Amino acid sequence: MTEEFFEISAKDLKKQERFLTTGCSKLDAIFKGGIPCQGITQIYGAAGTGKTQLALQLCLTVQLPVTAGGFAAGAIYISTEAVFPAKRLHELIQNVDVIQNYDNINGDVVFVEHISTIEDLESSLLFRVPVLLNKHKIRLLIVDSVAAPYRVEEWDDENRSKSLRTVGQQLHNLCTNSGICVICINQVTAVIEDSNRHDDVKEQSSLGIMWTSMVTNSLYFHKEGSTRYVSISSSPYLPCTTTQFEISMSGVKGIE
């Protein structure tokens, strides 16, 4: 019996990777194809920076045909902070430019679950989400936000870390085994001033190094005055860049 070995370059692996369009060609170009369907993509930032707006837009673009950058599939939206913004979703259905030529894009294939506890988040990911994936064609999973249950409950560091490992590992398993795109919205914490730092970063993603170590790509949404920016803060293949964007009736769009 002989063993055959195949060499494959990082560039070839990149070509094999699948992406979900953001619905904006400018943002897709910056992300080198859109939101990657490999590992966990984290979108973090302060309240009101546009994180949920992009998440809702992705719930629609995932329904686009493959030829248009989607997967002709539905989405699961796990909401942990507030009531799901159904009104805004329907507004986007009427106004997002990239979906207007398609009649079958709607909210009927966006499956929403509201949870508030850590135990319920684990249960949803380990049991209820796999059942939905078996019953329906779904290619997008959004958790908005992953930090909220951990901020509400008082857990010791050991049990908190154990739960984060469980959640992170299951998200990676779902991505690998079911071929879905995984998006986790996250909150921010203040960065303690350090004279050894050579940047002007004032906030970082919540949940600490345990969670950060399991994130594949990390996008930072922030504002300066009324101007919105998205920065690629960490990625195995994307350069750390910052791009201006806007939010309107027709969704999230990068600005030239």
Image (cartoon, rainbow, N blue to C red):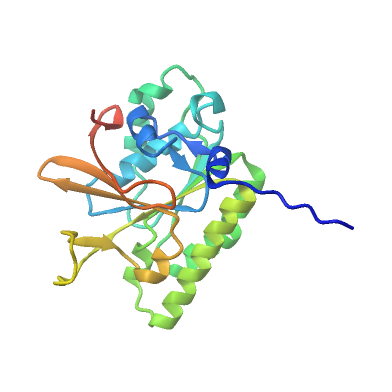
Position of residue 235 measured from the top left corner of the image (x, y, whole percent): 40, 52
Residue at x 43% of width, y 82% of height: 158
Front residue (pair 105, 139)? 139
Residue at x 34% of width, y 40% of height: 54
Tell me where residue 72 sits by quadrant.
top right
| Total labels drawn | 0
- For residue 77, side relative to residue 18 (left or right): left
Residue at x 37% of width, y 31% of height: 90
Q: State the residue lying farthest toward the top.
A: 101
Decide: is 66 above or below 159. above
Picture quarter with the N terminus: bottom right
Decide: is 157 above or below 133. below
Front residue (pair 62, 42)? 42
Front residue (pair 136, 25)? 25
Position of residue 15 measured from the top left corner of the image (x, y, whole percent): 55, 38
Front residue (pair 90, 61)? 61
Position of residue 175 measured from the top left corner of the image (x, y, whole percent): 56, 51
Decide: is 39 above or below 123. above
Q: State the residue lying farthest toward the left.
A: 225
Decide: is 121 above or below 12. below
Picture quarter with the C terminus: top left
Position of residue 101 measured from the top left corner of the image (x, y, whole percent): 45, 16
Residue at x 42% of width, y 23% of height: 99
- For residue 55, side relative to residue 16 (left or right): left
